[in-house]
Amino acid sequence: MRIPKEIRKLADALSSLPGIGPRQGIRLAFHLIKKGEGFQKSLADDIKDLSAVKICSDCFYIHSNPGELCEICSDPDRDKSIIAIVEKDTDLTSMENASKFNGTYLVLGEFGRGGSLEPDQKLKIKSLRSRIKRDGFSKAKEIVIALNPNPQNNFLSAQIEKELDELAERITRLGVGIPSGGEIEFADEDTLGGAIEHRR
Ligand SMILES: [Zn+2]
């Protein structure tokens, strides 16, 4: 079947997104045609607006504030001496939705399959040192390692813990609630809230 090149091009771009295969890419592209020009234009504008999104210089979460810091890092009511280390931006948003954590974050970025930390992730962990000192603490009160519980991440958590050992009075992990192999991103708010409250 011949598919116009405009659709083919869009389908290729869409199928590079997580969870979307080539067939779904084509299906979505056809669907967008049916949605009409108004929808296409507003979607294109929304995508264009993403170029205004920046990465926080402290925690590496995305933001669109005028300065360098995200909303959480620039909020004077957040406890800068408590830092949760998460893998993905969406883990941070899930933790925020659970409303049980008033510290700040460090977003490492997605782990590769290799089972060890990437160089840029190691740099991010190192950046915590100057961040803690700059905020006037000799040590963080607590660093929470909030990674999805699975065997690879348990290994990574131990690695991170070793790197941060002398940087925090207490290094904790999320408590029970999220089963091994489960994901923070998809945990319901009560479960995740409980895991945050019962960190140890
Ligand atoms: Zn931030």
Image (tube, rainbow, N blue to C red):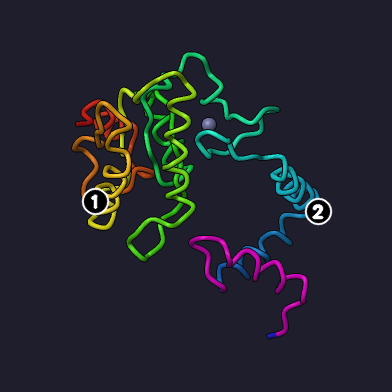
- Figure disc tally: 2
Q: Nearer the viewer, residue 157 or 137?
A: 137
Quarter the N terminus occupies: bottom right
In the image, taking residue 101 as reference, residue 194 lies left or right, namely: left
In the image, taking residue 3 as reference, residue 117 lies left or right, namely: left
- SS at circle 1: helix
First along the sequence among labels 1 and 2: 2
Q: Nearer the viewer, mark 1 or mark 2?
A: 1
Q: Mark 1 packing: few (<14 Cα in 10 Å), some, or many (20+)?
A: some
Q: Is residue 15 magenta?
A: yes
Residue 67: x and y, percent? 67, 27
In the image, taking residue 177 as reference, residue 59 lies left or right, namely: right
Quarter the C terminus occupies: top left
- SS at circle 2: helix
Q: Mark 2 packing: few (<14 Cα in 10 Å), some, or many (20+)?
A: few
Find residue 37 and name its label: 2
Give me the residue at 39% from left, 20% from top: 137
Give me the residue at 43% from left, 27% from top: 132
Q: Which residue is mark 1?
A: 154
Q: Is residue 183 magenta?
A: no
Q: CA separation, marks 1 and 2?
A: 48 Å
Please report the bounds of the magenta region as a residue range.
2-22
198 relative to 161, above or below: above
Q: Quadrant of residue 98?
A: top left
Q: Quadrant of residue 11?
A: bottom right
